[in-house]
């Protein structure tokens, strides 16, 4: 019987990450509600809500508290994660929801505490008397002690996995599952595919900079379209030099590299600077020296073409 009770308690225990996710979802909901509410006053005078912002926020959070914790024993984030609060002070092992007193104190500690902190900050900011300075120091001391208590509670929560916030510990309420959680079958096919793809992409990112794309392209072009029986001499250069062997346009400042093909000076120079073993993409001849074309190409030849 004792082992069965321990197993049931372990089965109903909520994971730490689930409790923290519920808190983050609650914060995201509050920000969303506040942003939607402020958009309703977008066309009004700027700063209209600045004077009453703490009160307006307290009213909105009280409205959310009424339809979440007070009526459903769970916040919005907890409802999404199938979690709800349980009264830890109840001697009954079965589920007992928090009492109305605990719910009211929860609203006072969370909503009332935030409102009091913001309102005191606004009051002390506009007052510079000595009496207000003492009160301000006292408020800062109390807030600091509460922050310290929250930190200690969080460290205990990380160790034991119960009472994620200081308010929950003081009120004696902790998170439990609404319905029993069944064991889930975890499939790793998707994870394996992602790991394989990421490993392959990292390998390509490491390998591609080591591959000389220009030289590989020139080799493939030389194999696919070999040049046979090419004439030699300056006349051949003038005849076959009506376009750059790299860009295919009329050669600007035509130069050669030791073969019968003609290149733009900038095309040839940039490729040679990028790759010292650059070869002609037409015939595969490597660069020996950059020489300007001696037999100029007349514009009459272009018009004749």
Image (cartoon, grey):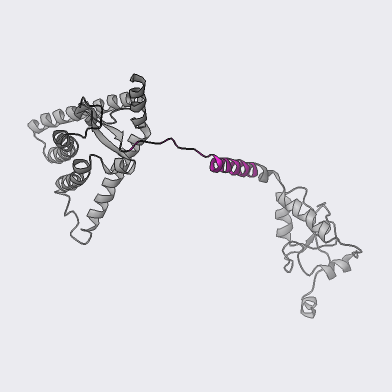
For residue 130, side relative to residue 144 (left or right): left
| Residue at 30% in and 43% down | 79
Q: Is 141 placed above or below 301 here?
A: above
Q: Please state which of residues 85 and 150 is positioned toward the viewer in this rendering.
A: 85
The reply, left or right, for residue 296 in relation to residue 132 is: right
> Residue at position x 15%, y 31% from top?
139
Residue range corresponding to the magenta coloring: 179-205
Q: Is residue 189 magenta?
A: yes
Res. 290 in view: no
Horizontal and vertical percent position of residue 162: 30, 27
- Looking at the picture, tell me which residue is in the foreground, 17 or 294: 17
| Image: 128 above or below 305 | above
Q: Main secondary structure of the magenta part?
A: helix
In this view, the residue farthest toward the front is 1
* Residue at the (35%, 38%) spot, across then down: 21
Does 290 sit left or right of 4 as displayed?
Answer: right
User: Furthest residue to the top?
Assistant: 2
Q: Is residue 251 above or below residue 303?
A: above
Residue 11, visible in the rendered structure = yes
Location of residue 164 (image quadrant): top left
Where residue 10 sits, quadrant-wise, is: top left
Residue 37 appears at what percent x and percent y?
22, 54
**Can you give x and y, in whole percent of width and height, for residue 168 in the image?**
23, 31
Magenta span contains residue 251: no
**In the rendered view of the protein, which quadrant contains the C terminus?**
bottom right
Residue 160's place in the image compared with 30, above or below, is above
């Amino acid at each position: 019987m004792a082992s069965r009770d321990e197993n049931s308690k372990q089965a109903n225990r909520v994971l730490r990450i689930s409790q923290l996710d519920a808190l983050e979802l609650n914060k995201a909901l509050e920000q969303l509600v506040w942003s939607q509410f402020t958009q309703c006053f977008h066309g009004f005078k700027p700063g209209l809500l600045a004077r009453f912002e703490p009160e307006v926020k307290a009213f909105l959070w009280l409205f959310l508290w009424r339809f979440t914790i007070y009526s459903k024993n769970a916040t919005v984030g907890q409802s999404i994660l199938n979690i709800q609060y349980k009264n830890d002070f109840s001697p009954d092992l079965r589920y007992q929801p928090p009492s109305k007193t605990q719910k009211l104190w929860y609203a006072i500690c969370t909503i009332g505490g935030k409102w009091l902190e913001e309102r005191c900050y606004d009051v002390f900011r506009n007052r510079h008397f000595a009496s207000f300075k003492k009160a301000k120091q006292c408020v800062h001391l109390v807030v600091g002690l509460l922050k310290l208590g929250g930190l200690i509670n969080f460290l205990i929560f990380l160790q034991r996995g119960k009472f994620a916030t200081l308010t929950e510990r003081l009120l004696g309420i902790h998170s439990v599952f609404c319905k029993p959680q069944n064991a889930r079958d975890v499939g790793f096919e998707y994870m394996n595919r992602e790991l394989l793809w990421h490993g392959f992409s990292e390998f390509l990112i490491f390998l591609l900079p080591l591959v000389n794309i220009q030289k590989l392209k020139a080799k493939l072009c030389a194999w696919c379209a070999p040049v046979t029986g090419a004439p030699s001499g300056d006349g051949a250069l003038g005849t076959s030099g009506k376009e750059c062997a790299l860009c295919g346009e009329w050669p600007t400042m035509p130069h050669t590299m030791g073969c019968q093909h003609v290149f733009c000076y900038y095309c040839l120079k940039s490729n040679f600077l990028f790759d010292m073993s650059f070869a002609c993409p037409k015939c595969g001849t490597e660069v020996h020296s950059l020489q300007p074309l001696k037999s100029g190409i007349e514009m009459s030849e272009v018009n004749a073409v």
